[in-house]
Image (spheres, coloured by chain):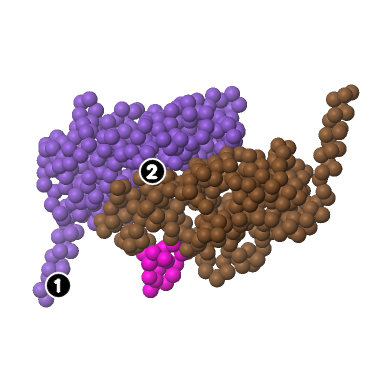
Chain colours: A brown, B purple
Amino acid sequence: MKKITIASFVAASFLSNVVVADDLIKKATDAGLKPIPNKTEELNKLIDPKGELTPAKIELGKKLYFDPRLSKSNLISCNTCHNLGLGGADTIPAAIGHKWTANPHHLNSPTVYNAVFHKAQFWDGRSPHLADQAQGPIQAAPEMAAPSELVVARITSIPAYVEEFKGAYGADVNISFKKIADTIALFEHTLVTPSPFDAFLQGKVDALTDAQKEGLNLFIDKGCATCHGDVALGGTMQPFGIVKKYRFADVGDFKGDKNGMVRTPTLRNIAQTAPYFHNGQLWTLEEAIKEMGSIQLGIEIDDKEASSIATFLHALTGKKPEVIYPMLPASTNDTPKPDAK
Amino acid sequence: MKKITIASFVAASFLSNVVVADDLIKKATDAGLKPIPNKTEELNKLIDPKGELTPAKIELGKKLYFDPRLSKSNLISCNTCHNLGLGGADTIPAAIGHKWTANPHHLNSPTVYNAVFHKAQFWDGRSPHLADQAQGPIQAAPEMAAPSELVVARITSIPAYVEEFKGAYGADVNISFKKIADTIALFEHTLVTPSPFDAFLQGKVDALTDAQKEGLNLFIDKGCATCHGDVALGGTMQPFGIVKKYRFADVGDFKGDKNGMVRTPTLRNIAQTAPYFHNGQLWTLEEAIKEMGSIQLGIEIDDKEASSIATFLHALTGKKPEVIYPMLPASTNDTPKPDAK
């Protein structure tokens, strides 16, 4: 009978930790956590505040996002490092780009999914929005390495692209580098991934398992939501290594913005985007949770707690928009040639 | 009136070159050109002779095709060099792979579209079919650089992949490297692209423009169909540089198979897959056509003729199967880590 007694005790102990769902929704909301709106009008306020999104622009943005001819070599597209099939990231510690160059600061590629909800882009938050962000990696020497004039020359040399820009923006469109990046960003604005957590916050009390609810409760109690809040569960500038120096702080030379602040990553789809931290040094959610507790909150999160919070984080894995792989228009005799050098 | 006279003369001259459509269909058929069958049963004889294709296997093969974790670095997938959005190829002269290594023989990546119709795979034809071919680039050091055991370890460490293999092949499936490559090949078997040329051969006489018909007629008259025949319009082993040495023969060290034979490329979607020839040294169809005339047929094809044949070749640009970009299952703590070294 001993086994049964232990099992009963474990079950009772487990249940006692599960707060009533309605209370937990209120607690999460009070802690600043917000769902991805499930009403189109509310969602559009977040992803399309200027009313710019049209099917033609989104489709064109998708093509550009997947087109490696936006890189100097013709080999690297936005999707190389922000792979929509891999949680919007690349599965490696630090980005590798043109000529197999590692990111000089040893920075990990953040996911593109739900990046529209970030208050700032890049790990140092230097960019206010995706339209600005998209201009960076295309031109950066260790990433896509394409001068803006080259990108414009490639795209405008392809009549089918020119026609698509006209169709999206009107016959007098100026196909500038900014316009190209803006269009990519509009596609990225559509990359939002509603998850079981969102359904739960919206009142579907059984959208989370009891174990996930317990993890959410712990996530809030431990203070994680302080920095990982709002719709993105992250995406704002925060001090880093508040209590203690990050264990792998010396891998790469990244020190945050001029005030040492770091843009927190979104926790949405985090179970799909290992490795973790700005320099990609931790490979499991549990390790990352414990490190965060130690360096940011000054608490020790034990194995069982880390596992519980990780269980909740899996409930942030969302449904990805269906993407039909784009057929890209062929280069012409006038298209500037690839250059792998 | 002079202008009108000239215009009339040009029109008459043009029309005189257009053979009657029914005769041209017969002429093309007699020359050994064959359409992609439009009847499922006939098509299946070519793409699924063993009756292996199922939706589950095709979907799994698609995921593997797009998964960069089949490479040592986690950065290169089959789709990197055989990009389904770019005519099934990569737009660069010679393939670039792991550690940005150029193909040591300076070989151009052939298209994956319609490769199922090839009688041999690789430029030297060393592989009899796609299931065998797919094993090569994954392991090759300058390509994906992944030892077969690493590929198996990666895939089998991901429970969602294991489940998909069981769903596709049965619970007792052995997820070997061969099985992984075989599954990729089954997806590739579905990558066939019916074109206006096929509709024409199947009796839709207005599927080609008059200019395309004229180009087809010239294509046959010049002797191009001798090597570029059958369903693939290519894909067989042929002598290369018969009459004259290829102008760029010294770029790279490729000399064909042990008898100097080279696998002809398919001409399907050729307008989308510049640059041309095994070492990717020619960027326009017209140049490639003239070079072929010179070195293979011992004839001079003039600018006007080359342009006419190129016009026909555009009619080989086919409709690509719609591919929904696959969402790949996340790596686990047991998944062997990426290695960019």
Q: Secondary structure at mark 2?
A: helix
Residue B315 image point, x, y percent: 30, 51
- Pointers 2 and 1 in contact (CB under 8 A)? no
Residue A338 image point, x, y percent: 30, 51
Can residue B48 be seen here? no
Residue at x 57% of width, y 39% of height:
A283
**Would you name the residue on which mark 2 appears?**
A100
Badge 1 density bin: few <14, some 14–19, many ≥20, Cα 10 Å = few
Q: Secondary structure at mark 1?
A: helix
Q: Which amino acid lies under the numbered mark 2 shown in the image of this protein?
A: Trp
Q: Main secondary structure of the magenta part?
A: helix
| Frontmost residue, A262 versus A280 | A262
**Would you name the residue on which mark 1 appears?**
B4
Q: Which residues are magenta?
A: A162-183
Residue A205 image point, x, y percent: 78, 51
Q: Nearer the viewer, mark 2 or mark 1?
A: 2
Residue at x 60% of width, y 59% of height:
A236
User: In the rendered structure, the residue with mark 1 lies on which chain?
Assistant: B
Badge 2 density bin: few <14, some 14–19, many ≥20, Cα 10 Å = some
Horizontal side, residue A110 vs residue A43: left or right? left
Answer whether residue A175 is magenta in the image: yes
| Frontmost residue, A35 versus B52 | A35
Answer whether residue B114 is magenta in the image: no
Residue at x 65% of width, y 58% of height:
A231
Gap between marks 2 and 1 measured at Cα: 61 Å
| Frontmost residue, A284 versus A311 | A284
Question: Marks 2 and 1: same chain?
Answer: no
Quarter holding residue B239: top left
Vertical arrangement, residue A295 with respect to residue B55, above or below? below
Q: Which amino acid lies under the numbered mark 1 shown in the image of this protein?
A: Ile
Vertical arrangement, residue B131 with respect to residue B197, above or below? above
